Image (cartoon, rainbow, N blue to C red):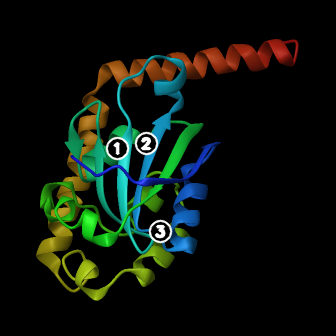
Amino acid sequence: MKLPRGRLDKSRVVTDPRDSLADVLDRKLTGYAVFESQETLLLDGEGRGVITFTDGVPVLAYHTGTDRGGPPALADLAIPGPYHVSLYALDAADLESAHEAADLRVPPGMPAERLGGDPALADSTRRAASDERLSPMGSDDDAATAEAGATERSAVEAFLDDTEKIAAIKEQARSEARERAQQWEF
C-alpha cells in the first residue's frame, strides 16, 4: 500500500492501541496511523500495521511484514503491546486512490474490536461512519455479513496456523512471567 507522506501529528508509546483509536475518533483525524508492536520494537519482528482513517473512522488496514490487508492485517497486528503509534494527518484527497483498494478495507468498528477489545469504542466508530461505509457491512445485508464473518474466521485461522508467531508469543509470555517471578521473589 502506497500512501503519501503525511504530517506527523502525534507519536508515542501506548500499552493499549485502544487509546490511539479513541484519540483518532475524538479528533476526527483524516490520515493514517502506523502501529509498531513490541515484537517489532524489541524482538526484531518484521513489519508494521498501517490503518487509514477518514474523519476518525478506519477505512483500510495493511501489515507490511506479512503483506496482508483488511481483516487479516488486523489479525497480524493483534499481539500484546506496548505499541509505538505514529499518527499522520493527510488531506482526504490524498487518500482517495488508496481507499479504492477494496481488498484492504475493514469494517469501521473492527480495529476497535480486534486491537482494542473495546465494543463500546467499536459502536461509537460505527455511529461516526457514513452510511455508505456501513451498508456493505451492515446487518441488513446478510451476504455481506456472512462474507465478513468468513473473512474474520480466515484471519483467525491464519493466525492460528502461524506457528512461529504463536511460539514467539508463548516465549514472550514465559519471559515476562520469569521477570515477574523474580520481581516478586518467587
Query: Looking at the picture, which amino acid does disc 1 mark?
Result: Ala
Image point 25% across, 32% down: which residue? 66
| Rendered image: mark on residue 29 | 3
Position of the C terminus by quadrant: top right
Residue 81, percent from left and from top: 57, 37
Query: Looking at the picture, which amino acid does disc 2 mark?
Result: Ala
**82 or 85, nearer to the observer:** 85
Please tell me which of labels 3 and 2 falls first in the chain: 3
Relative height, residue 25 to residue 182 (above, below): below
Q: Quadrant of residue 98?
A: bottom left
Residue 138 visible in this rendered orientation of the protein:
no
| Rendered image: mark on residue 78 | 2
Residue 174, percent from left and from top: 60, 17
The mark lying in front, picked from 3 and 1, is: 3
Query: Looking at the picture, which amino acid does disc 3 mark?
Result: Leu
The residue tagged with tag 3: helix, strand or loop?
loop
Please tell me which of labels 3 and 1 falls first in the chain: 3
Relative height, residue 131 to residue 99 (above, below): below
Residue at the spot of label 1 = 75
Q: Quadrant of residue 73?
A: top left
Residue 108, percent from left and from top: 35, 69
